[in-house]
Amino acid sequence: MEGTSQPGVKSPRWPFANQAEYDDARKLAAARQQIAHEATYLDTFDELTPHDQEMSAVDALHYLRAGRRAGLFEYARGE
């Protein structure tokens, strides 16, 4: 699935290795957005536009992969 279009996703390329990595990136993005909401009253993840949710998930994907590469945690679901 990497680099392909995903139905319902407005980005031209789908950067996630598989559905599990996508799901985990969205969970991480939602948790990060909740922290921001609690600290600064920004919108919650559910209050973001679908496009902003997807962009947040891509950012979270980069943190997931960086954490694996740095050896901070093991991650098997998205591999």
Image (cartoon, grey):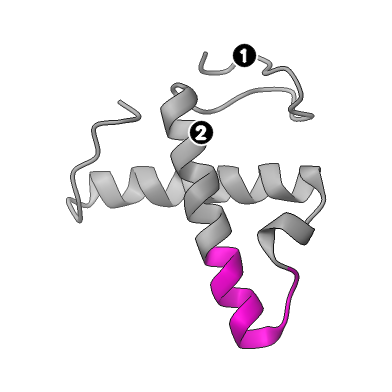
30 is higher (above) or lower (below) than 77: below
Image location (x, y in percent) of residue 76: 24, 32
SS label for mark 1? loop
Task: Tell me, yes or no, whether the two marked residues, 2 and 1, touch with CB atoms within 8 Å.
Answer: no
Image location (x, y in percent) of residue 74: 18, 43
Asked if the stretch drawn in magenta spans residue 36, the answer is: yes
Image location (x, y in percent) of residue 45: 67, 59
Q: Which residue is mark 1?
A: 4
SS label for mark 2? helix
Q: Is residue 44 left or right of residue 71?
A: right
Three-letter amino acid code at the position of disc 1: Thr
Q: Which residues are magenta?
A: 32-43
Q: Nearer the viewer, residue 61 or 44?
A: 44
Residue extending farthest bottom? 39
Badge nearest the viewer, 2 or 1: 2
Q: Is residue 68 left or right of residue 47?
A: left
Image location (x, y in percent) of residue 55: 68, 46
Residue at image point 56% right, 50% down: 59
The circle on residue 32 is none
Q: CA distance from mark 2 to mark 1?
A: 13 Å
Q: Which residue is mark 2?
A: 22
Q: Nearer the viewer, residue 14 or 19?
A: 19
Residue at image point 61% right, 82% down: 38
10 is higher (above) or lower (below) than 68: above
Residue at image point 50% right, 49% down: 27
Three-letter amino acid code at the position of disc 2: Tyr
Q: Nearer the viewer, residue 6 or 13?
A: 6
Q: Is residue 46 left or right of residue 36?
A: right
Mark 1 residue crowding within 10 angstroms, few (<14) / some (14–19) / many (20+): few
